[in-house]
Image (cartoon, rainbow, N blue to C red):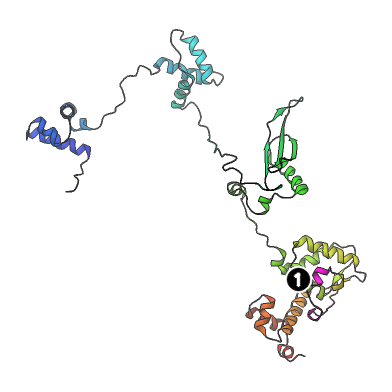
C-alpha cells in the first residue's frame, strides 16, 4: 500500500472539515490524523479566532526576552557610533555607556558589535582566503640541495624606525643556511632578486629540476604559459640566429653552407647559448673571414663521417638571408637524395618532411632527381 502524501496545511484543513461535519468524536478524529488532542484543540481554537489563515505555521520566536538589550541602550549605541566626530569601536562605546547608564550593566563588546552590524553601521570586511603555507608535509629528503625551506624570520624595528625583514633560506637536508638577508619588506622584487642570486650560486633544487613543484603554488603563479621548444626542435631558426650572432662580431664574417648544415644537424644540448658560443669561437679563429667546417668544435664535426660530409658551398657575407636559406635548403635536399639514391620516400624520412612538401621544394629549386638516381 503506497504512502499517503499530504502537506501539513492540507491535513489541518481536512481535520477542521471533519470536525465541522461532526463525523466522529474528538478522540477518534485525533487518532485518525495521528495528532494529540492538545494539538487538535489548538487548531480548532486558531480556526475560530482567525479562520483558515490561523492554521498557518506561527513564528516560534518568544514575545519577550529577558536578555534582550533595552531599546534605550540600543539607540544610545547607534547615537554614539553615528553622531560622534570620531568613529568609535565597541570598546569605547561600552565605556561611554557605563558613564551614561551607571545603574545598568552595559552589553558586552560582542553584543555592541552585533547591534551595529544588524543596523548596517559597520561596513562589511572582505574575507581573505586563508591558505596554509604547508598543506602537506615535505616528502622524504635524501640528499643536499633536494629541497629548500624559506621564510621571513620575524620582522624587527631598527634604530631609525624602519623595519627589517630577514629572509632565511636553508637546505632542508643538511640544515645549512644558504641565505640570511635583511629586506625592507616581504615584497616580490627584492625576494626574487635574492632567489636569483641563490640559484646562480647553488643551482636549482632537485625538486624544481624534476618538475615536482607544488601544484597549488604553480597554478597561483601560472598566469600566461609561453612554450619555448629547445633548439633541436626548431632547426629552421638556426640560420637566422647564426646571422644575428655574426652581425655582432668585430669584423665582416661569413659562413659556408657546409658549416651551416653541420650546425643545423647538431642536437644542441646547450640550446641557443651553446650556438652563440660556437659562433663567437669560430669567428675569432677564422682568419679568412669565412667560417668553415674546420673552425667548428669536434662534437659537431664528429657527427658526420668523411664520406657523408655535405658538399661545400661558399656563401659570401653580402648574400641576403633569404638567398642563403634557399641555397642551404636546396643543398640539403640534394644531399638527402644522394644518400637515398634518389628515392624520395626515404629522403623525406631524413629531412623530416612529408612527400608532398618534398615534391614542391624539388620543383621550386629545379632539382634534377633523375640525374641523382643515375649518379651524375
Q: Is residue 309 magenta?
A: yes
Q: Residue furthest bottom?
A: 374
Classify residue 131 as left or right of residue 209: left
Q: Is residue 333 magenta?
A: no
Query: Where, by quadrant of the figure, is residue 21 drawn?
Result: top left
User: Which residue corresponds to mark 1?
Assistant: 264
Classify residue 174 as left or right of residue 20: right
The image shows residue 5, relative to residue 352, as above or below, that is above
The one of 155 and 185 positioned closer to us in this rendering = 155
Q: Residue 106 appears at what percent x and percent y?
A: 46, 14
The one of 292 and 138 positioned closer to us in this rendering = 138
Q: Residue furthest top?
A: 103
Q: Residue 40 appears at what percent x and percent y?
A: 16, 30
Q: Residue 101 appears at what percent x and percent y?
A: 45, 10
Q: Residue 214 appears at what percent x and percent y?
A: 60, 48
Query: Where, by quadrant of the figure, is residue 360 drawn?
Result: bottom right
The one of 165 and 283 positioned closer to us in this rendering = 165
The image shows residue 307, relative to residue 91, as above or below, that is below
Circle 1: is it few (<14), some (14-19), or many (20+) Cα within 10 Å? some
Query: Where, by quadrant of the figure, is residue 26 drawn?
Result: top left
* Stretch in magenta: 296-314
Q: Is residue 292 visible?
A: no
Q: Residue furthest right?
A: 287
Q: Residue at x 73, y 85 (%)?
A: 367
Q: Secondary structure at mark 1?
A: helix
Decide whether the magenta segment is chiefly helix, strand or loop. Answer: loop
Where's the C terminus, which quadrant?
Answer: bottom right
Q: Is residue 356 visible?
A: yes
Q: Residue furthest front?
A: 142
Amino acid at each position: 500500500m503506497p504512502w499517503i502524501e499530504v502537506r501539513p496545511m492540507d491535513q489541518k484543513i481536512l481535520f477542521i472539515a471533519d470536525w465541522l461535519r461532526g463525523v466522529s468524536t474528538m478522540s477518534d478524529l485525533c487518532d485518525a490524523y495521528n495528532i494529540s488532542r492538545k494539538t487538535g484543540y489548538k487548531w480548532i481554537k486558531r480556526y475560530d479566532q482567525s479562520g483558515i489563515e490561523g492554521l498557518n505555521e506561527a513564528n516560534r520566536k518568544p514575545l519577550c526576552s529577558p536578555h534582550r538589550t533595552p531599546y534605550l541602550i540600543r539607540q544610545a549605541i547607534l547615537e554614539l557610533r553615528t553622531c560622534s566626530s570620531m568613529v568609535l569601536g565597541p570598546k569605547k562605546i561600552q565605556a561611554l555607556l557605563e558613564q551614561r547608564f551607571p545603574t545598568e550593566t552595559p552589553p558586552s563588546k560582542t553584543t555592541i558589535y552585533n547591534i551595529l552590524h544588524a543596523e548596517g553601521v559597520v561596513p562589511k570586511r572582505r574575507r581573505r582566503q586563508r591558505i596554509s603555507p604547508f598543506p602537506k608535509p615535505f616528502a622524504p629528503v635524501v640528499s643536499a640541495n633536494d629541497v629548500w625551506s624559506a621564510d621571513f624570520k620575524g620582522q624587527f624595528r631598527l634604530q631609525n624606525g624602519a623595519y627589517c625583514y630577514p629572509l632565511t633560506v636553508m637546505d632542508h637536508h643538511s640544515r645549512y643556511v644558504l641565505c640570511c638577508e635583511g629586506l625592507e619588506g616581504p615584497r616580490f622584487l627584492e625576494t626574487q632578486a635574492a632567489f636569483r642570486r641563490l640559484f646562480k650560486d647553488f643551482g636549482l633544487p632537485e625538486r624544481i629540476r624534476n618538475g615536482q613543484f607544488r601544484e597549488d603554488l604553480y597554478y597561483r603563479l601560472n598566469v600566461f604559459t609561453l612554450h619555448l621548444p629547445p633548439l633541436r626542435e626548431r632547426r629552421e631558426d638556426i640560420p637566422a640566429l647564426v646571422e644575428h650572432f655574426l652581425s655582432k662580431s668585430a669584423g665582416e664574417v661569413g659562413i659556408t653552407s657546409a658549416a651551416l648544415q653541420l650546425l643545423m644537424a647538431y642536437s644542441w644540448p646547450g640550446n641557443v647559448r651553446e650556438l652563440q658560443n660556437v659562433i663567437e669561437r669560430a669567428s675569432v679563429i677564422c682568419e679568412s673571414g669565412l667560417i668553415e667546417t674546420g673552425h667548428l668544435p669536434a662534437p659537431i664535426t664528429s657527427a658526420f663521417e668523411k664520406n657523408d660530409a655535405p658538399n661545400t658551398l661558399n656563401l659570401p657575407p653580402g648574400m641576403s638571408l633569404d638567398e642563403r636559406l634557399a641555397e642551404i635548403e636546396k643543398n640539403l635536399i640534394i644531399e638527402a637524395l644522394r644518400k637515398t639514391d634518389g628515392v624520395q620516400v626515404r629522403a623525406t624520412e631524413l629531412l623530416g618532411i612529408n612527400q608532398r612538401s618534398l615534391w614542391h621544394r624539388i620543383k621550386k629549386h629545379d632539382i634534377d632527381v633523375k640525374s641523382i638516381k643515375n649518379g651524375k
